[in-house]
Each structure stands twice: as C-alpha cells, then as structure tokens.
Amino acid sequence: MAEENKKENKKIIIAVDAMGGDRAPDEIIKGCVEVFGLCDNLKIFLVGKEEIVARKLDEYKSRELNFDIEIIDAQEVILNNESPTWAIKNKKESSIVKGLNLVKEEEADGFVSAGSTGALLSCSTILLKRLPGISRPVLATLLPTINKNKFVMLLDSGANVDCKAIYLEQFAHMGYVYMKNIMKINNPRVGLINVGTENLKGNIVTKEAYELLSNSDLNFIGNVEARDILSGIADVLVCDGFVGNIILKNIEGMAKNIFGMLKNDIKKNIFRKLGGLLVKPAFVNLKKKFDYNEIGGAPFLGLNAIVVKIHGASDYRAVKNAIMQCVSFVKNDLKEKIKLVKA
C-alpha cells in the first residue's frame, strides 16, 4: 500500500514539442498551461526555441497561474517535407530529437508532438527502441461511434503501410491492452478490417491475420467492413497503415463535407433556418465527436516509452488532452502491460 501511494504521488514529467504543428508555439503553450487545472503532480518540459517560448510563456506568468513548466532550448525544427532519416542525422538540436532524448534518458515520462509524423516515428523507433516481442510500433487512433461516449481504436492509422499478418496480430493485442486499461472496457471486441465479413475474404495478409486472430486469446469477432467502423460493433479494429490512413482521412473529409452540405442546405429558406435552430445542439454535439482536438492524440504503441502524436492543425485542447493521455498511460503502467503481448 505504501508503495502504491508513493507511486500515486510521484511527479509525472511530460516533454512537449513547442515548435511542431501549424499553430505552434502559441496553441502548444496554451495547452500546456491549461492542463495544470486538470492534473496534480505534473511537470512539463517545453522543448523549442528558448527566446520564442519564453516570451510566449511570460504572457501567462502575469496571470498568477500555478504551473510547473521548464523550457528546454532546441533551435532547430524538423519540417514535414524533410526526410526523417536525414533530419535525425542533421538536426540533432531539433525539438523532436531533444524531446525524445529527454524520454530516453528517463528525465521525462512521455513526449507529445504535433510535428512531422514520419520524423516522430523514425526518431522514436531509433532513440527509444521497440518493446521486446514487438515487430513494429503502431499508430493508434480513437474514433467516435454511434454509441454515446464510446470509441473504437483504429490501428494502424498510418505508421506501417506494408504489414505482415503477425504485425496485425500484435497490433490487435496492443489495442486490446489500451482499450482495457485506458478506456476501461472489459474484454474489448477485436475486429479485422476487410472487404467482406466472410472468413475467406481478403488478400493473403488478411487471410493469414484472420487465422492468427482466430487462434489467439483475444475476443476476436471476425472481419468488419468499412461501413461498420463507426457502428460500435468492435472496440479495436486492425488493418495495415495504408488502409488505416485512407480510412482516417476519409472519415475526416466526410465529416467536414457533410457538415458543410447541411449548413448550405439549411440556409436555403427561412423555414429550414428555423428548423436548423431547433436541431443546432444535436449538430454541435455531433461535430464535437469528430473534433480531434477533443480526443487529444494518437499514441505510438509498442515503443519502449510513451509518445503521442497530435494533428498538425491541433489547438490547445488537443495538446491538453494529449498530455492527459500520457498521464493516464503512466498511471496505468500501459508500457509494462504491453510488454506482455506475445511475439
């Protein structure tokens, strides 16, 4: 009991990339400041150009807010159009590399970035290494379902465009561990994204993955078609990163365009405008469900440390929620539980 209390009271330290994303550093810094209203025993390392970050942070210090933030100077930024392997070798003073090194040296418990996905994945894999028995780290994204306050985890959502069947099985195990321990779902249902529900459907990889998952100790429900992703039929959905990223971008685009079409249609006459006012709260709630800022970020599961990727266009809410994800990972020993995943 004493050991548990000591662990509970231990300060959690999260490193945050202050320079990554379209809205850095303003929204990043705002998210870091505001998270202190949600969490005790937290310290944040803001990694970025010291003179810029310090000037922005000073704006909050005058408001008598209680936050524990330390600036780690990093004068370089890895751009989205730069090769990840080149950037790792040539931009050692970048916010991503320096932030990940804080985690590697165990000075921080986790890292959050809205920067280049490719660079973040490559740097994380090289510097932090994979967990024993894990072939590939996986990008795991939470998506809303038709069930109230329920989510489905899609993995891989973009880290590995080419996969072997064994990778998909490992992704399933890691997603299961996440949903059970972080989302508190008892015995999460695992599905395999495919072109049909029959067990003989799909390509060579999905057929092999189906066999592996069928013979695993997971709660495998079989193949799931793309139209059922948001239906709540499963808690974990597995696919390769090529398929997963297309699904993710399609859902993003569909949600944005459908709301746009509805808005245009409602504006056509006064009666529709009046009806629109009546259903506006429902539309606001639905739009909120598809807002990535409300969820936070997508963790890279399977690494020897906690890394969370947030959308490049994220605002302060995504930053705040991603930091809280990291806190939850630490408190639930997620890394140690994923270590139990079978090779």
Image (cartoon, rainbow, N blue to C red):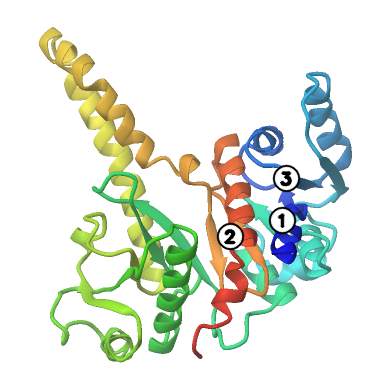
Q: Disc 1 marks which residue?
A: 78
Q: Is residue 129 left or right of residue 47?
A: left
Mark positioned earlier in the residue sequence (3 or 2): 3
Residue under numbered circle 3? 19
Q: Residues within 10 Å of mark 1 (few under 14, many from 20)?
A: many
- Amino acid on which the number 1 mark rests in the picture: Ile
Provide the secondary structure element on which disc 2 rests: helix
Choose the circle earlier in sequence order: 1 or 2.
1
Q: Position of residue 43 (x, y in %)?
A: 78, 46
Which circle marks residue 117 in the picture? 2
Direction from residue 40 to residue 167 in the image, left or right = left
Q: Is residue 249 above or below residue 338?
A: above
Q: Is residue 119 visible?
A: no
C-alpha gap between disc 3 and disc 1 = 9 Å
Using the numbered discs, state the Cα–Cα distance from disc 1 to disc 2 in whole angstroms.
10 Å
Q: Position of residue 32 (x, y in %)?
A: 69, 39
Relative vertical location of residue 236 with respect to residue 257 in this rendering, above or below: below
What secondary structure is found at the residue carrying circle 3?
loop
Q: Amino acid at mark 2?
A: Thr
Q: Are marks 3 and 1 in contact (CB under 8 Å)?
A: no
Residue at image point 38% right, 35% down? 288
Q: Amino acid at mark 3?
A: Met
